[in-house]
Amino acid sequence: MLEKAEVVVIGGGVVGLSVAYNLVKRGVGKVSVLERRYLGSGASTRNCCGIRSQFGAEENIRLARESKKIFQGLTAELGFNILHIKGGCMMLASTPEEAEILERNVRLQNRLGVNTRLLNPGELRARFPYLNPDKIRAASFDPTDSKAHHDAVVMAYSEACRRLGVELNTYTEVKGFKVEGKAIRAVKTSRGEVKCSRVVNAAGVWSRQVARMAGVNLPNRPLRAEGMVTEPFHYFLDPTIVHLNGPLELTQTLRGELVGGLADGEDFSLNLNSSLSFAENFCKRAVEIFPRLKFANLMRQWAGYFDVTPDGSPVLGPAEEVENFFQANGFSGHGFTLAPVVGRLLAEVIAKGKATPSLEPFYPSRFREGKLIVENTAPVDRLSWASTLPEASSSAPSR
């Protein structure tokens, strides 16, 4: 392991790897990635692989729109097939309140150049006959949304990092920092100490814990979620489906399996054990929307977690308390979608030493200032602790 690096990136998931890759591309010196387990062991490989720009906050829409553009050329850029498929994404609403959210979101998305539109009941039945129209009050659809294989994306970034000379340290846990004045001078790990000029906190659900070691307080929480996969079917589901009630997500792999997930309740633990209650709840709600799944066999299930913030939007940029400590966390279930653009933008901030307008709204200081970016498609609306911060100044609709 390096004894000295220009930048230390904490977290070997898709966000941390994207940041590291983009740093070396911009000529930053030695970059060292520290991962407590194996690469992609956190949320990066425990998600449904959706890539969308159907968000409710303008700042998130703008980021996601640019990230989608990067995904289109990522296989060629990284020299590794990420199995990128442009099948679209459909957001579903079952209540009047959820339908109003979709309608307002679509108007905002269209104003920002996103090709989303509401589907009327006739279109929904004609194009997606497998859906139960009795359980759907409104639906929005963007044919340019897509999906990619999470394992492939992690491998693509990690291989590109290796080729460019990034040091990837797995099973290396951060134990603390050596802070002098208002700057981190070294990172203490289970394998020794690394001197550095700058540090990026991309540790996912461990980001709050990592930040505390440097005297920085983040509002992030690790919201537990679970996922499942069915037996393979003849391929019929092009779009990724996101039902706002949950949110519940469902997609189909190229091999035919249906993969779905749900964050239900307020479990802030890091427990990765599967539960019978999830299987019962998910299957009941999935069959209500997709009746043809009634006789599908559940092959396996697993647990994971979202690194959520009170407003459902990521924490990006420099910490106030420590001048060379940059945050790339709190994605609230959208880290896979936003990783490519966040890696580019944050690398520019670090390499050039000046702010990037696209990231400024996401700075950690927004929580103190009450300038929240309320994201109404993130799984935080029902979390009790999310109401303890100042009121949001964003005009985005809340749930």
Image (tube, rainbow, N blue to C red):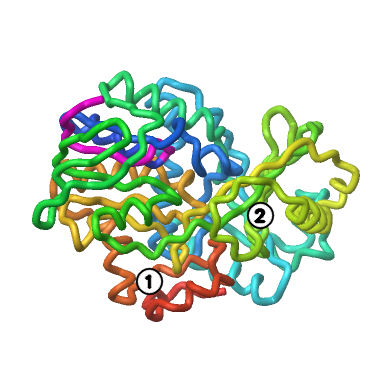
Tell me if mark 2 has few (under 14), some (14-19) or many (20+) residues whose alpha carbon lies within 10 angstroms of its own. Answer: many
Considering depth in this image, is 208 or 382 the residue closer to the camera? Answer: 208
Specify the segment rendered in magenta: 1-14
Residue at the bottom extreme, as displayed:
391
Percent position of residue 141, x then y: 62, 54
The kind of residue on which mark 2 rests is Leu
Vertical placement of residue 36 versus 137, above or below: above
Mark 1 or 2: the one toward you: 2
Please say whether residue 106 is visible from this viewpoint.
no
Considering depth in this image, is 225 or 255 the residue closer to the camera? Answer: 225
Find out whether residue 12 is within the magenta segment: yes
Task: Say left or right for 250 vs 164.
Answer: right
In the rendered image, the quadrant that contains the N terminus is top left
Task: Say left or right for 347 vs 202.
Answer: left
Percent position of residue 150, x then y: 53, 35
Find out whether residue 83 is within the magenta segment: no
Secondary structure under tag 1 reads loop
Task: Say left or right for 33 vs 89.
Answer: left
Task: Say left or right for 197 vs 247.
Answer: left
